[in-house]
Image: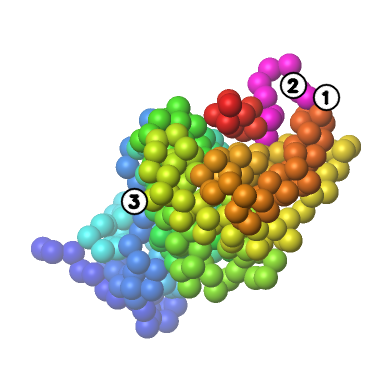
Amino acid sequence: MAPLFIDLTHCCPPCLRRFALHTRSFTSSSARRKHGLLPTFTATTSPELDTLLGTFRSNIFLPSHLIKLQQDLLYKQKNHSLLTSDEPATVRLGDEVLQLHPLDHKKDEPRTRSSVKKVVELMAETKDWKNLPGFLEGLKTAKRRLMGFQVEKMVRKANEDGKQGVVHDCLRRVEGTNMGLWDVRVAREVMWGAVLKAIQNGWSQEGVEKGVKYAENIWELMFDPRHAERQTRDSDPKKRPEVIGVLVQMHAAKAVMFGGREEEQKFVEKYSELMLKAWGNADWEVNEQEWNDANYKLLMWAPVWHAIKMARQVLKTGSPVSNDLGTKLTQDLEPLLQKTQAILVAHRPQEGRRRGLKMYEELTQVST
């Protein structure tokens, strides 16, 4: 005999208990319509990551897809006996039938901040990162809010692993993932992904062209109402010279290194003008006692320094835009870069390089 599925949307608590005594299968159609399908995860390269994703799915994401009365079965101790009898209680979500188990908020739910950090740390290969959009959608449905710095570090790790495509996918699915371009630090990190595409591909023609395409795709998303409507005057990345500078950098590098100067010149000039218009929004102050600040400032402005060096090779010599770029280079950028380098060299670790210094040294090699 086929199992009996009962929609409990309009049931009162006493009715819920009576239904639970007579049937162990429920549907959750209203919750499914509201939140969409329960995220599913593919196997990763890490058993620890598989376990952690599975725990989030069963103990956090599943309950968030249930109606209130079904959640009461999971969380209220007086109902737990209904879930621990010999006959399992199940719920149907879409085409999937899942067994319900008693849950305790404190004991069974991973802590959001530390556990999300661990998930990102464990992601390495493409098959791992492909789970990120669904994971973020699950967090949003479960009302597990991520702070801007958490998203920033997530994007940084994905970029360093060469998984910028996953970041782009999350940004396109912003309604579900809540990864948006309204936080200027996140937007910077996203745009640096274009520079890393070129670096990771040894500044080959394919790598630079990928960087150009990626930068343009992200720039287009910044005008998408889903992102733009949450941008404030202070957080609008479209008005930040260090963000626009990546577009200048990638188009200029393509022109200088692989030809097509006439075709690329219009883009270099267009974005250079936008960058110069936004120049007044730049912050040139550096805390000389804080190497973290110097590191971030060097990381922020090294691509712009490289962009101007390249752009002036593409633009007409003596043109107003070229001259203005030269002025910004000598008056603002070079003094800032010299100061930040000195601070970072003084705090250079025994192993490895500070991220800002690493970026600058990488770009210096390409500029010569």
Residue 367 showing in the rendered view = yes
Q: Are marks 1 and 2 in contact (CB under 8 Å)?
A: no
Q: Which mark is residue 349?
A: 2
User: Residue 343: percent from the left, percent from the top?
Assistant: 82, 31
User: Residue 220: percent from the left, percent from the top?
Assistant: 45, 62
Sort mark 1 into few (<14), some (14-19) or many (20+) by Cα contacts within 10 Å. few
Q: Residue at x 81, y 29 (%)?
A: 342
Q: Residue at x 89, y 37 (%)?
A: 289
Examine the structure image and report whether residue 115 is included in the region drawn in magenta: no
- Which residue in the structure is indicated by mark 3? 40
User: Residue 320: percent from the left, percent from the top?
Assistant: 63, 57
Which region of the structure is painted magenta?
345-358
Distance CA(mark 3)–CA(mark 1): 48 Å
Secondary element at tag 3: loop
State which tag comes first along the sequence, 3 or 1.
3
Sort mark 2 into few (<14), some (14-19) or many (20+) by Cα contacts within 10 Å. few
Question: What amino acid is labelled 2 in the image?
Answer: Pro
In the rendered view of the protein, which quadrant contains the N terminus?
bottom left
Please identify the quarter of the rendering in which residue 307 is found: top right
State which tag comes first along the sequence, 3 or 2.
3
Residue in front for this viewpoint, 62 or 128:
128
Q: Which mark is residue 346?
A: 1
